[in-house]
Amino acid sequence: MYQYIGHMGSAERSFLEAVRFGQLGKDSVWVAKTCSRLGGFYTTENRNFLALEWQQKALSLLEKYDTTRKAIPEVYNDISKAYIQLGELETAEQYLEKSLSLKKELKDTFRLGIISTLYADIYRLKGDYAKAESFYLKDIPKRKKQKNYEGLVISYLGLGDTYMEWKKYDEAEKTYLLALQAADTIKRYRTIGLSLVKLGQLYMATGRDEDASAVFNRAIKECTRVDSRNYQLTAYLSMYELYKKRNDVGEALGFLEKYTEVNQLHTAESMTLKSEDLTAAIELKERENELRRMDIENRKNAQTRQVLTMGIVLLLLLSGFLIYLFFTRNKILASLEKEQAQTKMLLAEKEELLKNLEESHHHLVHTEKMASIGVMTAGIAHELNNPVSSMHACAEALTMDYEELLPLFTALVGMKKNETPDFIKIEEILQKTDLENIMLECKTLLNTMTNGSQRTSDIILGLKTFVRDGGDIKQSYKPEEGLDAALTLLHHKMKDKINVEKNYQFGQPITCNVSKINQVFLNILDNAVQAMPQTGKIRIQTSLEGKYCCIKISDNGPGMDETTQKKIFEPFFTTKEVGKGTGLGLAISYAIIKEHQGDILVESATGKGTTFTILLPL
């Protein structure tokens, strides 16, 4: 029930309690089925290592205690789904083949549609859209007939994603609307939110911004009801991009603030979930190490058995049992070969799990990307506060000057109306008023307000440059603009203590992913500023080096030794105090530059500052 209404934390606790009570009742088949449902829950939450761990527990119990074997194909299907989400399509297909084979053997036709849908997912991920479409369409009529609305939502969303990737936008819209209708029928709010987000993304891709705005607003409302922050984040970010496209900075920043607020909660929860998933992967690795240790012991025992066997052979030779001992020896060798084959299989599975662990780690590193939004937001708030405060103070001072001159203005207006000059009254007012000081003060205040408004304009221009995002599409872009935007956002950290020297000689556009390159500039410049807490100098130089744009960012901070230089691009390595750095900024920057077929180099020495050189292909 909790999973159905979207309260996923309560659902997880209930499943775990169910497993515990089942174990107390010593009902192994019931425990196995509950473990399988818990594994399916973790698959829904994309916590795939935990899902595989619980599904393997369920499979082990069912193979031992379920004499009917009817529940085993469903476990195979759930294992296949987890491997699909991990991108291991060949392994997923192997488990689906096991499921189909066992169902044919048992003559079981129940829930064959799930297998069709999983095959469709595999073909979609492989890019074989026509084949994926045929599998989805084969499954949908059966689910309609059974009024299986939850299954219909899954099939419609998969078919809609196929059409979306296939660029068949009209069919994708119809299919997503059918998914939304099915989800509305059973009031599955998480699925409603997912359907709305996918529909909104389609409208954005086809330029229907008004429709997209309406859909995303409803998605935010539906996702807020339940623990569905992932879809909620997507909706907030899409609304931010829509208002940014309309140049409505106020509304765009409002949605960006909501996105940042929800993202902080989501990031904390996501880190916890990823930690649990990684813990499960580590436990699997430890289990493999235990199997390896047992294999070594088995080999030692086998050697011992061989020695004993040889002794027995010698003893039995005396009594005439040479032939019997020969067959016994062969049997032992065959058993050893079987154990060696099993050991090789376990080692192969271990390599596969390590590969999956590395990919999961890669996804975890990329969640750090959103941390740069916090730096950007803090810079904007701080930088805008100063000029706005100064303009407000100037306005108050000008009001006081106006009140001081008001008697003079009143006398002059009265003189115009009566046409009889009252010079005595005017002279009295002038003696009480310091006109020269007021003139100088008004000029100074107006200059201050002009400078403040210009500073505000510069900050907003820098923000527009920095947040320019084309998704994964590479765009034409001048690196100097990104460098200036990053300096603007970091101005509150530098203030007057750090001097910046710029030598821009490149001056031409390159083709790149704008938001990712801006992230690299912000990471490196922020590190340079933090390296000089008192005073210092940053030098930025751009130039053309063959077919590359060369960007050099230097500081005269404390520098690094050779050991530190070798580790700075490694994930989670940091020289900062605990709690002041994650050690992911430079690792992410390195990955972004390599993704652009470029290179990033560092030159440094203790006490002589640091220089980062970035090479980006034109």
Image (tube, rainbow, N blue to C red):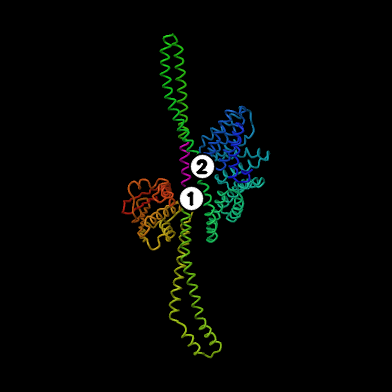
In this view, the residue in front, 455 or 303, is: 303
Crowd tier of the residue under label 1, counting other residues whose Cα lies within 10 Å: few below 14, some 14–19, many 20 or above: few
Crowd tier of the residue under label 2, counting other residues whose Cα lies within 10 Å: few below 14, some 14–19, many 20 or above: some
Residue 615 in picture, x, y percent from top left: 38, 50
Decide: is 601 above or below 538. Answer: above
What is the C-alpha distance between the residues marked 2 and 1?
A: 34 Å
Q: Which residue is mark 1?
A: 473
Helix, strand or loop at disc 2?
Answer: helix
At x 49%, y 70%, the residue is 392
Q: Quadrant of the N terminus?
A: top right
Decide: is 420 above or below 78. Answer: below
Identify which amino acid the numbered label 2 is placed on.
Answer: Glu
Start-end of magenta stretch? 353-366
Is residue 358 on the magenta stretch? Answer: yes
Disc ID at residue 276: 2
Helix, strand or loop at disc 1?
Answer: loop
Decide: is 51 above or below 530. Answer: above
Q: Is residue 505 left or right of residue 348?
A: left
